[in-house]
Amino acid sequence: MGSASELALLEELGRQLEITSIQGVGIREMLMASILRIRDKQGELAPLLLNRAQREYERTCGRRNIVLKARQLGITTYIAARFFLRTITHPGTLTVQVAHDQRAAEQIFRN
């Protein structure tokens, strides 16, 4: 278990998720790159660095979004990362990511 100071830090970061720095990189994006890992095309763990499609979604998304998307743009990964950060930085938050069938749901969270 983390200490009270670690929890306080996470909560403070949660209040700042929407803030964008002078260089145009937001707190959310910096957190994703520093604490989250994805499997790259070679199957190796790599930092979650946003691609062009993910950055565009970040820039244009609203409170409720419907994404008609092509495959392999990383939007599902990005949404899972957003949900995860929101959940760990806002106590009491419950998040759900829905897929169109069981196989697709399992694919989202595979190794």
Image (cartoon, rainbow, N blue to C red):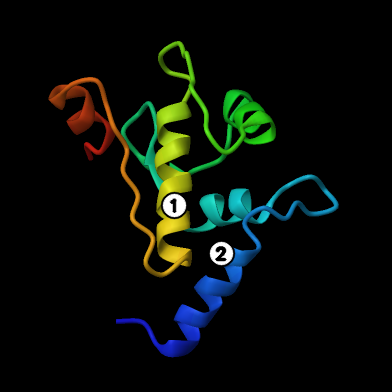
> Could you say where residue 72 lies in the image, as x and y percent from the top left?
42, 18
Give the quadrant of the N terminus. Answer: bottom left
- Residue 103's label in the rendered image is none
> Could you say where residue 39 lies in the image, as x and y percent from the top left?
35, 37
* Residue type (three-letter) at the residue carrying disc 2: Gly
- Residue 36's label in the rendered image is 1
Residue behind mark 2: 14
Q: CA distance from mark 1 to mark 2?
A: 15 Å
> Could you say where residue 55 lies in the image, as x and y percent from the top left?
64, 32
* Residue type (three-letter) at the residue carrying disc 1: Leu
On the image, which quarter does residue 88 sit in?
Answer: bottom left
- Residues packed near mark 2 inside 10 Å, few (<14), some (14 to 19) or many (20 plus): some
Residues at discs 1 and 2 in contact (Cβ within 8 Å): no
Is residue 41 toward the left or the right of residue 12 in the image?
A: left
**Residue shown at 49% from the left, 43% from the top:** 48
- Residues packed near mark 1 inside 10 Å, few (<14), some (14 to 19) or many (20 plus): some
Which SS class for mark 1? loop
Answer with mark 1 or mark 2, whichever residue precedes in sequence.
Answer: 2
State whether residue 88 is above or below residue 79.
Answer: below
**Residue shown at 41% from the left, 70% from the top:** 91
On the image, which quarter does residue 96 sit in?
Answer: top left
**Residue shown at 31% from the left, 33% from the top:** 43
Give the quadrant of the C terminus. Answer: top left
> Could you say where residue 9 lies in the image, as x and y percent from the top left?
55, 77
Q: Nearer the viewer, mark 1 or mark 2?
A: 2
**Residue shown at 62% from the left, 35% from the top:** 58
Task: Specify the farthest residue to the bottom.
Answer: 4
Which SS class for mark 2? helix
Task: Specify the farthest residue to the left.
Answer: 102
